[in-house]
Amino acid sequence: MRRRLSPTGLPSHLLARIAAAGLAAWTAGTVLPADAAPAPKPAAAEDSDGSIPQDSIVAVINGTVLTRRDVDNRGRLFALSAGLDLTDDLMARLRPQILRQLIDERLRQQEMLSRHINVPPEQIAATIADIERRNNMPHNALRDHLAADGISLTTMIDQIRVQLGWTQVLREEMGSRGRTTAAEIAQREEALRREDGKPQYLMSEIFIPVDDARHSDDELKFTQTIIQELRNGAPFPIVAAQFSQSQTALEGGMMGWVQEDSLDPQVVAVARAMPDGAISNPIRVAGGYVIATLNGRRTIGHQMGTMLTLRQAFLPFTTPLNPQAPSEQQRDMLQQAQQLAASVHSCPDLEAANHRYGDKRPANPGDLQLERINPQMQQILADLPPGKASHPLVSGEGIAVLMVCARQQKNFAQQTPSEIADQLMNERVEQTSRQLNRDLRRRAVIDIRSKV
């Protein structure tokens, strides 16, 4: 089930602050003096080699300029995030939709300004820190990766700022509708009882909007390009975060567990026949195209499983591990991990050990469903008695020792009132976001200067 939207779009326990020098100034949207950078060229005149100059204006949105450089920087950011080679052909196929996305972002940014919504630098810094943490990247590594590929960190900062600020806009827009009542929760609970035994899907989505249903060729071509890259191995959550125009983009496209009456009929037809893990073809729905992937399926009201409460201690390496030539520090850490596994007998003791080794990873990784853990880890945890440490688990960055604190049989298909409230709220937020996007575009003065 998707989580209720937080101010950052992320659960609070994942947020860690970056203390990088100068980040607060960058995230504050500092404007350079007029003589500090060349003015953009007034038209998209071609250079002598036939290419469009990077500083050429490609669109003006209510007086705000977009340049070819803005479009190409976003394309490079996407390629870097997804681990793709950004060929000229791929960039040519991406540019039209990137331009559309940047136009929507400028409209959202202008709406934020009109409502006096300011995203604190700390929120943006925390989001960047979380991206680094989830990808096991050292502090400031993301900025270094971007710089190495010729991408300014401000390209990512601008996107994050709009995503976070738009969430605040939607809260204001919904007003009192931003709260779910006990009666609404009870009504959904009754609907779920009536659907007992019917299928439910754990889905992720990428939504590509179409402004004019009579002329959707560009959006269809872009959707097909994204599907091709996903099937070639691009990570679905990263692509969704970059390109989906649904609010689920903040969660990497994750919709959570949804029943058929909560989905478009066209999506339901695909989900019924779709193998787990597959990437759908373009699905035409009202307002655009959906790319879907199915992460699991279950029967409403019936999914017994095992919930594990875990703790871990992580002993970090100072350098990446070379299995053929471990360093002295790495051999010493293995010896310490073996001693720890033999001597620790309770979850609080393991938490204390993790703290002694610097809390490089959280001692409490959160409750996990045994059946949804990867098979190798299932083998380790399935028969591990509570209070007994696992053998040391070696990775490239360090060594983990795990312990099961509690094991509980649970019906995972029974949604709690809190989970139902989250689902109702997310449906309401998504509807509000799409409606407000349409209104902003209808009122805007958008001047497309050239094809990108």
Image (cartoon, rainbow, N blue to C red):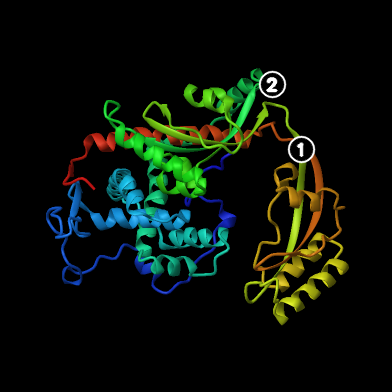
In the rendered image, the vertical position of residue 115 relative to residue 153, given as above or below: above
Q: Vertically, is 80 above or below 205?
A: below
Q: Which residue is drawn at 15% across and 59% down?
A: 47
Picture residue at 40% right of the left edge, 38% below the top: 224
x then y, percent, for residue 86: 38, 55
Instruction: For the residues labelled 1 and 2, say whether their Cβ atoms are less than 8 Å apart.
Output: no
Residue pointed to by mark 2: 197
Taking the image as shown, residue 15 lies to the left or right of residue 69, namely right
Secondary-structure class at tag 2? loop
**Vertical order, 297 against 350 (above or below):** above
Separation of disc 1 and disc 2 at Cα? 17 Å
Q: Which of 18 and 180 is in front in this view?
A: 18
Picture coordinates of residue 380 (x, y %)? Answer: 80, 53
Amino acid on which the number 1 mark rests in the picture: Gly
Q: Where is residue 400 in the image (x, y as percent from the top left)?
A: 73, 64
Question: Which secondary structure lies at badge 1?
Answer: strand
- Quadrant in which the N terminus is drawn: top right
Amino acid found under the numbered disc labelled 2: Gly
Residue situated in front as seen by the camera: 226 or 35: 226
Quarter of image, res 301: top right
- Within-10-Å neighbours for mark 2: few <14, some 14–19, many 20+: few
Mark 1 is surrounded, within 10 Å at the Cα level, by few (under 14), some (14 to 19) or many (20 or more) other residues, namely some
In this view, the residue farthest toward the bottom is 328
Q: What numbered label is drawn on residue 420?
A: none
Query: Residue 356 placed where, x, y %?
Result: 72, 73
For the residue pair 101 and 178, the one nearer the viewer reads as: 101
- Residue 433 visible in the snapshot: no
Left of 314 or right of it: where is 379? right
Read off the residue under disc 1. Answer: 305
Residue 357 in view in this figure: yes
Horizontal side, residue 257 vs residue 108: left or right: right
Mark 1 or mark 2, which has the lower sequence index? 2
